Amino acid sequence: MGTVTIQPVTLIHLEADGLNVGKALDSALRQGKSPLWFRQHLQRWKSDCVVGPTIVLGLLDERMGKRLPRSWFQRLAKQMLASEGIRLVDEWPVHDARGVLLAELDLADVETKVGVECQSINYHTTPADIARDIRRKRMLRRLGWEIVELWWTDLNRMEDVVDDFRRALERQRRLKS
């Protein structure tokens, strides 16, 4: 039988190997693991010779008191758009006039009503997925929202996505004036 470690120790090993410890930490926290439990175990491993626990504790501190994005793709998209000066909120709920939740936009500029939907092959490519997405977009547009779609492949052409976003902002601003 192989060696088994607890998640905080595994995170230290991931960090030491230069792997994406932030993504693994997000996943564990989304699954309901206690930040306090992580902190206690990481503190135990903290020493002058091992930097991993300190780095992972820093990542944990960055996440405390904040809502975690549903997906790593959403976090990456937000960071890439922020690097272009576009500041967005995560998972903005949009309700109809009766208060029924129509959508939780992955990212949104609430003031101008421009949303970004991070699309993935897993949830947005079957005929049923496409039909559902079309209905949602129509309902959102009726409520005054502009939606910009962002696919994984778009991360390689962010200048186009930023251009799409800025055009959507401009359309919204023209409508308000």
Image (spheres, helix red, strand yellow):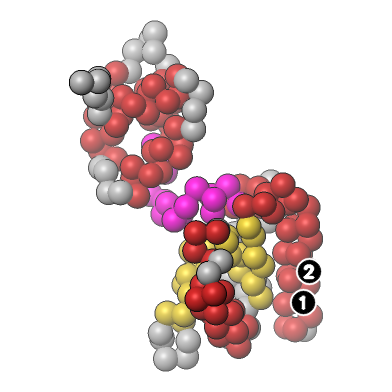
Question: Where the C terminus falls, by quadrant?
Answer: bottom right
Q: How far is mark 1 from mark 2, CA to CA?
A: 6 Å
Q: Which residue is mark 1?
A: 171
Q: How many marks?
A: 2
How crowded pointer 1 is (Cα within 10 Å; few <14, some 14-19, many 20+) is rated as: some
Residue at numbered disc 2? 167
Q: Residue at x 73, y 58 (%)?
A: 161
Please name the amino acid that badge 2 sits on.
Answer: Arg
Residue occupying the far top of the picture: 49
Q: Residue 49, how many percent across, how many down?
A: 39, 8
Crowding near the residue tagged with mark 2, few <14, some 14–19, many ≥20 C-alpha atoms within 10 Å: some
Residue 28 locus on image (x, y percent): 33, 42
Q: Nearer the viewer, residue 158 or 58?
A: 158
The extreme bottom residue here reads 98
Circles 1 and 2: CB atoms closer than 8 Å = yes
Question: Residue at the spot x=50%, y=59% of the render?
Answer: 122
Which label number is shown at residue 15?
A: none
- Vertical relation: 124 (above or below) 56: below
Query: Any magenta on residue 71?
Result: yes
User: Which quadrant of the structure image shows residue 42?
Assistant: top left
Q: Which residues are magenta?
A: 60-77
> Which residue is more in the foreground, 42 or 22?
22
Q: Is residue 109 left or right of residue 68?
A: right
Question: Depth check: 90 or 103 in front?
Answer: 103
Q: What's the residue at 46%, 80% (across, down)? A: 102
Residue 108 visible in the picture: no
- Three-letter code, disc 1: Arg
